[in-house]
Image (cartoon, rainbow, N blue to C red):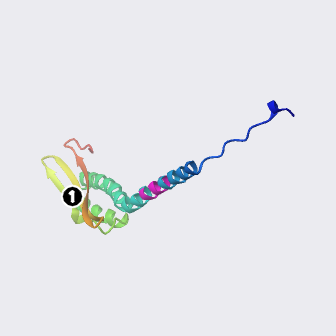
Amino acid sequence: MTDADAVEPAPRRSFVGRLLRWVALFVILLGIGLVSAAAAFLYPYVRDDFRIDGIVRVVALDWRDFGRARADERLRFEFADQHIGRHTSPADCALEAVGEARTVRCAWTVMLKVAGRDVPLAFASTATIDPHGDLR
């Protein structure tokens, strides 16, 4: 074997290089953890908002097809059946008739504790049956 055939060993990473790699990994994992914690904290409220979006549509269609009394009954049933959280109820909803149009509107707010302060988080869902009977 000659000197020309010899393979040089790969250079070792310096201590600073290895340390920076571990710090970067730690920061990334910490960021993922914080985002996951925030998502888990907000999930029940966002889930209920999506459910209420569907409820207002169904209630508006029932109002169009079967009348206001049936729509009120359907609103209470859907809130109970879909296990909407304790932070909202059918009392947060209104059925409004303006001319020929009918609107079902639900609006609710949750106060979240963030860094010792109360921060409002507001949600609203609306469905309207226009004078032609179409859902908007």
Foreground pick, 33 / 136: 33
Query: Looking at the rendering, which quadrant does residue 44 occupy?
Result: bottom left
Most prominent secondary structure in the magenta stretch?
Answer: helix
Q: Residue furthest bottom?
A: 86
Residue at the (80%, 35%) spot, across then down: 6
Q: Which residue is mark 1?
A: 68
Residue at the (15%, 46%) spot, across then down: 100
Residue at the (67%, 42%) spot, across then down: 11
Left or right side of 63 for 39: right
Q: Residue furthest top?
A: 4
Left or right side of 125 for 83: right
Label 1: which secondary element: helix
Q: Which residues are magenta?
A: 28-34
Foreground pick, 120 / 61: 120
Q: Total of numbered circles in the picture?
A: 1
Q: Quadrant of the C terminus?
A: top left
Amino acid type at image mark 1? Arg
- Residue 71 forms part of the magenta stretch: no
The location of residue 53, given as percent across then percent down, is: 31, 53
- Residue 29 forms part of the magenta stretch: yes
Foreground pick, 74 / 48: 48
Q: Residues within 10 Å of mark 1 (few under 14, many from 20)?
A: some
Left or right side of 20 for 86: left
Q: Quick check: 51 above or below 117?
A: above
The location of residue 86, given as percent across then percent down, is: 31, 69
The location of residue 1, given as percent across then percent down, is: 87, 34
Q: Residue furthest front?
A: 3
Q: Residue furthest left?
A: 99
Foreground pick, 70 / 43: 43
